[in-house]
Image: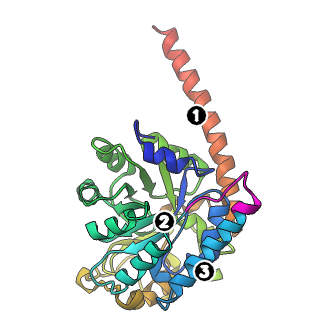
Amino acid sequence: MAPGSALAQRLRGRLRLPCIGAPLFIVSNPELVIAQCKSGVVGSFPALNARPKEKLEEWLVKIKTALAEHDAAHPESPAAPFAVNQIVHRSNDRLMHDLEACVRHQVPLVITSLGAREDVNAAIHSYGGLVFHDVINNKFAHKAIQKGADGLVAVAAGAGGHAGTLSPFALVSEIREWFDGPIALSGAISTGRSILAAQAMGADFAYLGSAFIPTTEANAADAYKQAIVDCSAEDIVYSSLFTGVHGNYLRPSIVAAGLDPDALPDGDVTKMDFGSGGASDAKAWRDIWGCGQGIGGIKKVEGAAQVVQRLREEYAAAVADTAAAAAHSMGQASSKL
């Protein structure tokens, strides 16, 4: 955790694991978000998943009600806050409608993507909400903070969906040179050990998506879930064909669509369209399965609570192992002085 990052510490204090469940297009739904939050990690979903747009109000009420009931029944282990992802691309004609719903329901955390806007940030800040903006490089990180974002999601190489190309070591290091606020790191993180590694690099939180696709609550086809269990990092293909922006996808789904994953043409970024709820992208994302490179650590389909419990156990073991290794190394160094 960055020195002086009071905001990160405040959010971390509400979690049982320094983890944010990434918003997964089509896959994330209220059931998954509720299960994640009850387990002590931030659960999130893209506003565009609620279709038609009037459904968003229903989803927000359902999530808030379930978490409030959980907190009343379990005051000793309150649920983590939830988040909504807003696509701030100019083609998203739902943005103002969805933003108004988030303000009305005072969504604790809003994650913005594909554009940073001061008016969006101001609307969330009006009731005390937080805004994290996802970025793939240091240039976009500067722009996001200049426009009022509270924190950043550093999307590094290996992340699922729309991913960057930079090493997480380089990306977090460059951002930490000037920014001491909250950073969540995304990119091939699916184990407790990798969550600790993200913190060691300078991030406050790990940002996990693919690990929650093969869960019983997720809105994903059984074949999609099983493919994640069966595949590994070398089965991930990086392409811009499907949405116009480069992203990572499961090779078997590309083959099943009758395409050659080793000879995909480039997509056209000018045709990226999130209008009317992103319906133009729905078929591509439903048939071609987004996924990150960190799936080697995912061994079975299980409930979100079981995933979080596994991560917590792995994280605790990694902390103990790292502390022992560090103590040994320091002892060795001291003996040579």
- Please identify the quarter of the rendering in which residue 239 is found: bottom left
Relative vertical location of residue 210 with respect to residue 274 in this rendering, above or below: above
Q: Position of residue 298 (x, y in %)?
A: 63, 62
Q: Which residue is mark 1?
A: 322
Relative vertical location of residue 193 with respect to residue 250 in this rendering, above or below: above
| Residue stretch rendered in magenta on the structure | 71-81
Looking at the rendered structure, the secondary structure element under dot 3 is loop
Q: Considering the whole magenta stretch, tell me its main secondary structure.
A: loop
> As drawn, is 336 to the left or to the right of 58?
left
Looking at the rendered structure, the secondary structure element under dot 2 is loop
**At 40% from the left edge and 76% from the top edge, which residue is drawn?**
99
Q: Amino acid at mark 2?
A: Gly
The quadrant the C terminus occupies is top left
Q: Which residue is mark 3?
A: 219
> As drawn, is 215 to the left or to the right of 136?
right
**At 39% from the left edge and 51% from the top edge, which residue is drawn?**
168
Looking at the rendered structure, the secondary structure element under dot 1 is helix
